[in-house]
Amino acid sequence: MAIEIKGRAEIDKMRASCRLAAEVLDFIEPHVQPGVTTDRLDRLCHDFIIARGAIPAPLNYKGFPRSICTSINEVVCHGIPGDRKLCEGDIVNLDITTILDGYHGDTSEMFTVGQVSEAAQKLIDVTRRSMWLGIQEVGPNKRIGDIGAAIVDYAAREHGYGVVEAFCGHGIGREFHTAPQVSHVGKRGTGIRMRAGMTFTIEPMINEGTSRCDILDDGWTAVTTDGRLSAQTEHTVLVTDDGVEVLTLRARDRR
Ligand code: MF3
Ligand code: CO
Ligand code: CO
């Protein structure tokens, strides 16, 4: 499939949707506390997104029943909000995708509930850093495989973690998931060349142990096969004429 190159007007719409997705994370962060249910976090995000004139992309996407994904502890991704209460020591990924003016913005972040173990905090730190190392590989004429190569070099070779292969980053725009596929275990010098105007996500899922995943009977929830922890962070990025623009940066991370 051909990879879409976005023009000025489309890029502005991507910027707006992505900024809104980042604002949802800012909004929800103080609510991530012991005792809150994932359904409550879902409802709060849903209402925030609707109030801003946007649509939560996950809701009814291929039958997904909620407006955000909430992935706790051994859940790798696509956790479905429900009556599970967050507990002291949990780590949780909140994955937000907005549709504003027809364009998708997709970002996710890890949150810690109360005090978490040193091992959990290290997994989160390495995951976030691996995403940033991947983002640093983005630029015109560079190869898409270099992104995953940087991620796997750091998270797996350096830290011994499992880098999930079953789920990838993806092109994004009017569609939620489109070309290119962005592997987080890429090989240097392989894959398509990036071009200015492409937008895609980088969203490594990093596991304490094995990289292997199972899907629960709900058809969505991906878990580690060994029950150990998994972490993920995600940004939507734009390839620019001279490098990369991170479209889903949160206010506190913008200059
Ligand atoms: N936001 C996820 C991603 O990063 C996709 C969620 S699909 C859903 O690609 F249906 F589970 F919401
Ligand atoms: Co995504
Ligand atoms: Co996402």
Image (cartoon, rainbow, N blue to C red):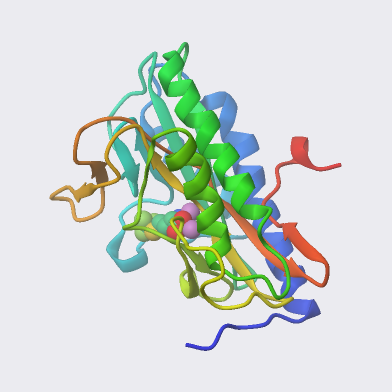
Q: Nearer the viewer, residue 159 or 200?
A: 159
Q: Residue at x 36, y 39 (%)?
A: 71
Q: Nearer the viewer, residue 221 or 50?
A: 221
Left or right: where does residue 24 sit relative to residue 206? right
Q: Nearer the viewer, residue 248 or 49?
A: 248
Q: Give the quadrant of residue 120.
A: top left
Q: Quadrant of the C terminus?
A: top right
Q: Is residue 91 above or below residue 151?
A: above
- Tell which residue pokes out farthest to the right in this image: 255
Q: Is residue 91 above or below residue 193?
A: above
Question: Could one spot residue 58 in this view of the protein?
Answer: no
Residue 20: horizontal and vertical position, in percent? Answer: 66, 52
Residue 92: horizontal and vertical position, in percent? Answer: 42, 32
Residue 126: horizontal and vertical position, in percent? Answer: 52, 33
Q: Residue at x 52, y 49 (%)?
A: 151
- Tell which residue pokes out farthest to the left in this image: 217
Left or right: where does residue 113 sit relative to residue 20? left
